[in-house]
Amino acid sequence: MDMKEIKLSQYGPIVSSKTVGDEIYTLINSSLKKEQSITINLENIKSMATFCAKQIFGKLYIEMGSQQFFDRITLKGADNDLKTIIQIGIQHALEERK
Amino acid sequence: MNLINRIIIAPKHFRANSIIDFINDCQDIYRLSNKNENGFLLDLGKVKECTMIGVLLIYKIIEFSIKNNCFNMPRYIIDLPFQEAMEKYGFTKLILTYLADKDVAEKEFANLKISVSDNFIIAPQALLRNDKYSSELLNKKYLPQIQQYYSFNDKAVTMIFLCFSEILLNFWEHAVDDTQSIIVANGNKSNIEIACVDNGKGVLTTLKLAGKEQKDNLSTLISAVKKGVTSKDLSNHMGYGLWIIDQIAAKTLGRFHLYSEGCYYFREFGKVKSGKCGHWQGTIVYLSIPLGKPVTLADIETPDDNNNLQIKWI
């Protein structure tokens, strides 16, 4: 079965506001309510404020738990810098929870 | 004939290292809202050279004083060098319209244009408070032109966009009371300057409101560029973005200036300096970075392996 793909290209090349971060989070979250697993296509996202990485991916990671996040979400097309931004966003969310 | 009882003379060579002098001279303006003081003169006629940050600061002071009715019939002296600087950085119509009619100027605000040649790109962009609209404008029209200009240096584009992401986020979250701010980029193939100036809530006020006040204002400002201690309230998260900007300036041996509400922090060519200065309502962020050896977040920070994050990348 094909996995549903959410393309974030319309939000690129940078994600730099809370409003847009909220919109992306809501888009992903409502997809997760309908689909068992999804792919998030980040190909046109060149950069993202660390705030937004935490707001979107940190929040999802906390809400879903690490195993569910891994099992249900695939992140596609991020370069090394975007990967670092997203990892730091998730890391901060985890640290904040401690 | 009207007597002049208050005069501000813009620096003769208005570069980044003149910012403190200018804001020292301008600080009283913030106490004159709705005072309609008589006899004010802004003398831009002694300016021989004015860089991007100079034009931006002069615009903000004119905009604030007119919008807040600080002066009754203010006078302005403008000579050729400042006219040329306004023209070069795309501010002529906006500033001159402001001096003539502030209501028309507010419409003119959104019409700033990017100019690009082989040798340079000058890109002013209005930051409208409808940030969804501004985000779209930035992403669809503004940033692609910068990306295109620097297409020969992909890592530089990543570094520039990382700076934009963090500066803009900082602006949207902090400068909530300012509806007329502008971000400007001025670059050539080997260097880029980015400046964002607002008269909203400054970094200091925002940190204090978030309960992060240090022993004095200067220490509070310096804490803003330290690697952030996250607040439990997501909307109050701050500090990390300015730390990234500071680290980029450090590793590229560039320049980063931060001014807010009577204090400043500089990192210039590897050296750090901070101190007190005139009151600027809001925040001034100025960044000038060489592009020869670009630095991105992956060069600054590696995620902590101990967290063993479970992320599926393809």
Image (cartoon, coloured by chain):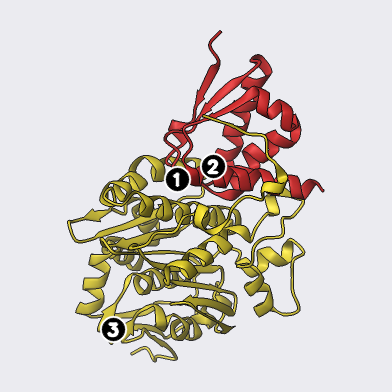
How much space separates mark 3 and mark 2, taking CA atoms? 47 Å
Q: Earlier in the sequence, mark 1 or mark 3?
A: 3
- Nearer-the-camera pick, B21 or B264: B264
| Letter of the chain that mark 3 sits on in the rendering | B
* Disc nearest the viewer among 2 and 1: 2
Q: Please tell me if label 1 and label 3 are on a single chain.
A: yes
- The vertical placement of A34 against B271, above or below, is above
Q: Position of residue B128 (x, y in %)?
A: 46, 50
x 42%, y 41%: residue: A13
Q: Please tell me if label 2 and label 1 are on a single chain.
A: no
| Letter of the chain that mark 1 sits on in the rendering | B
Type of the residue with mark 1? Ser
For label 3, the SS is loop
Type of the residue with mark 2? Lys
Number of numbered discs visible in the structure rendering: 3
Which numbered dot is residue B68? Answer: none
Q: Are marks 2 and 1 in contact (CB under 8 Å)?
A: no
Q: Residues within 10 Å of mark 2 (few under 14, many from 20)?
A: many
Q: Please tell me if label 3 and label 2 are on a single chain.
A: no
The hue in which chain B appears in the rendered picture of the protein = yellow
- The vertical placement of B244 against B28, above or below, is above
Q: Residue furthest right?
A: A98
The reply, left or right, for residue B80 in relation to residue B52 is left
The reply, left or right, for residue B148 in relation to residue B69 is left
Q: Position of residue B72 (x, y in %)?
A: 44, 77
Q: Would you name the residue on which mark 2 appears? A: A83
User: In which quadrant of the rendered image does the N terminus of chain B lie?
Assistant: bottom left
Q: Position of residue B35 (x, y in %)?
A: 55, 77
For label 1, the SS is helix
Q: Would you name the residue on which mark 1 appears? A: B134
The hue in which chain A appears in the rendered picture of the protein = red
x 45%, y 45%: residue: B134
